[in-house]
Amino acid sequence: MKAAPVRIVQGIGPVSCEVSECTHVMLHIPSRTYPEVFPVILKGSRAGTNCWTWNGDTNKPTIKPSVLTRNHNETFRCHSWVNDGQAIFLTDCSHDMAGQTVDLLDVTPPEGSDEK
């Protein structure tokens, strides 16, 4: 699985759920040391939401817009598109994957919650 649908439960964090119930998606972009959780919407306009759009595909996820991660002093910068299950690293990355396209790493969904 390249993308795990999750919802955030207060006091617990991300829990596994069906795609139709998700508020976030967990992805592991290869330049990162661990999977990250992104707020997403599945349809409609993302304007004013601070969310990415996600195609809902757990095997070949696409999220938009691009993902930019950097540290406070800009010594590390990772900028990529996630399209059809791959990370497309832009040339403004500071790491050695800049300009490359690589498959996303597999993610293990977090355990579900009994809370309804």
Image (spheres, rainbow, N blue to C red):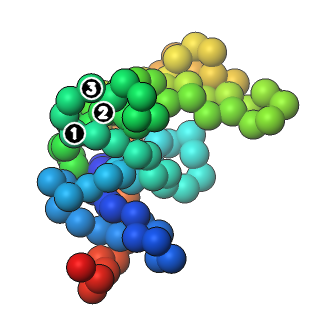
Residue 82 to residue 1: above or below:
above
Q: Marks 1 and 2: in contact by CB < 8 Å?
A: yes
Residue placed under numbered mark 3 in the picture: 45
Q: Most extreme residue toward the top, as rendered?
A: 91
Residue type of the residue flagged with mark 3 = Ser
Q: Marks 2 and 3: in contact by CB < 8 Å?
A: no
Q: Quadrant of residue 51?
A: top left
Residue placed under numbered mark 1 in the picture: 42
Q: Position of residue 17 (x, y in %)?
A: 23, 66
Is 71 left, or right, of 107 in this rendering? right
Q: Position of residue 97 (x, y in %)?
A: 56, 27
Q: Earlier in the sequence, mark 2 or mark 1?
A: 1
Which residue corresponds to the image point at 40% horizontal and 46% vertical from the top-left?
A: 39
Q: Nearer the viewer, residue 40 or 63?
A: 40
Q: CA distance from mark 3 to mark 2?
A: 8 Å
Is 69 left, or right, of 87 in this rendering? right
User: Mark 1, mark 3: which one is toward the viewer?
Assistant: 3
Callout 1: SS: loop
Residue type of the residue flagged with mark 2 = Thr
Few, some or many C-alpha atoms within 10 Å of disc 3 (few <14, some 14-19, many ≥20)?
A: few
